[in-house]
Image (cartoon, helix red, strand yellow):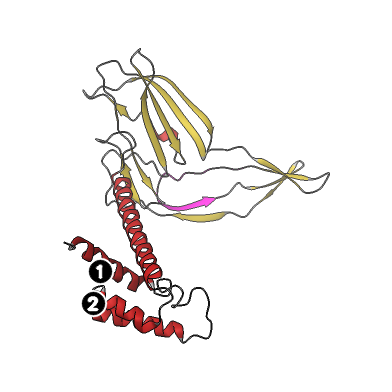
Amino acid sequence: VDEPPGRTVRLDDERGLDLLYRVIRPLSPGPLTLDRAGVVAGASIIPAAARTLFVAPLPKTGRPEDFTGLVGHMEASLSPAGPEGKTTLRLSGNADLKLAGTPVQCVDGREPIVVSDRLKGHWPEWTRILTLLTGPECHPRLRLAWYDPKMGDYHNTTGHPTGFRPTGVVATLLATVLLAWAGREAYRLRTCRRWLNRDLAGLPRHRRLERLTKSGVPGPLAARIDHHWQLRETRPTRGPSSPAAKPGDALPWSICRQLAVTIDKRRRHRP
C-alpha cells in the first residue's frame, strides 16, 4: 500500500474535505475486499461500505523467466556516472518501482554494489534512481521484465540494449512505411490534378476526352473519367471547381491515382 499526497476540497468558506489516496497492489489473483475507508468527522469515523474486486491472473503465455511480478508501464535507462566505475540506473513508470530490486548484472554474472537508492516524486509520476559501483570490466546489462496491462503483453529487456522493445521497432518501421506511402500517394494526386487543371481547363468535355485519349490514357479509364465529368456537369451548382474550370479537382482520389500511375508509366517508357 502506498499513500500518495492527498488534496483538500473546499465546500464553502468554513468547511472542507481532506481527500487521502491509497494505492493497493494485489499480490495474488482472486477476490480482494477493500474496507477501512470512510470519512473522519471530528472525533468520529463514518465508515464506507466495503467493496470486493476480482483480481484477474496474469497470462502465462509469453511470461519471461526473470519476471518478478512487476505490473504497469515501465521505462529504464543505464548511463555512466563518472570515471570511478559507477553506473546510474533510472526507473520510472506507474508500476511498483520498489519491487524491481536491482535489475542490473555484469557480463560475468556479478551483481554490482548499490551505492545509493532513492525515490523522487510519488506514484504514478515517480522515479527511482540507483547509483551502482560496477567497475571498468563489468559492462552492465539490464535484466528487467514486466507486464503492461495497457499493451496486454510482457516486456523484457534481457539481452537487448536498454529500453529496446522489438514491438516498438516494428511499429516505427510500419509507421515509416505508411508515411512514405501516404506521401507518394499525395504527390501522385497533386501531379494528376495539376496536369489536368493546366492542360484541360476551359475546354468542352469532348475536347478534354480527345486530349486524354491522345495522351495515351487507356480507353476504360478515359470512359470512367468522362462519366465523372458528366455527373459533375449535371449538378445544378456551377463554380470555380466545376469540371470545365478545374477538371482535375472534379475527379475522385481513386481515379486520379490510376491516372497518375499511367502518367508515371509514360514517363518511364518515354524514348
25 vs 255, left or right, is right
**Is residue 195 shown above or below 122?**
below
Q: Mark on residue 262?
A: 1
Q: Which residues are magenta?
A: 21-34
Q: Position of residue 213 (x, y in %)?
A: 26, 78
**Tag 1 and tag 2, C-beta contact below 8 Å:** yes
Residue in the foreground of this view, choosing between 224 and 152: 224
Check the picture and name the quadrant holding the C terminus: bottom left
Q: CA distance from mark 1 to mark 2?
A: 8 Å
Q: Which residue is mark 2?
A: 218
Asked whether 119 falls inside the magenta stretch, the response is: no
Considering only order in the chain, which callout, 2 or 1, is on the residue closer to the N terminus?
2
Whether residue 1 is visible to the viewer of this picture, yes or no, is no
Few, some or many C-alpha atoms within 10 Å of disc 2 (few <14, some 14-19, many ≥20)?
few
Asked whether 24 falls inside the magenta stretch, the response is: yes
Query: Which quadrant holds residue 82?
Result: top left
Q: Residue at x 25, y 63 (%)?
A: 264
Residue in the foreground of this view, choosing between 167 and 47: 167
Q: Residue at x 32, y 54 (%)?
A: 180
Q: Secondary structure at mark 1?
A: helix
Q: Main secondary structure of the magenta part?
A: loop
Please name the amino acid that badge 1 sits on. Answer: Thr
Q: Position of residue 177 (x, y in %)?
A: 30, 53
Please name the amino acid that badge 2 sits on. Answer: Pro
Residue in the foreground of this view, choosing between 264 and 136: 264
Q: Secondary structure at mark 2?
A: loop
Q: Residue at x 47, y 41 (%)?
A: 94
Q: Position of residue 224 (x, y in %)?
A: 32, 81
Q: Mark on residue 28?
A: none
Q: Position of residue 77 (x, y in %)?
A: 37, 31
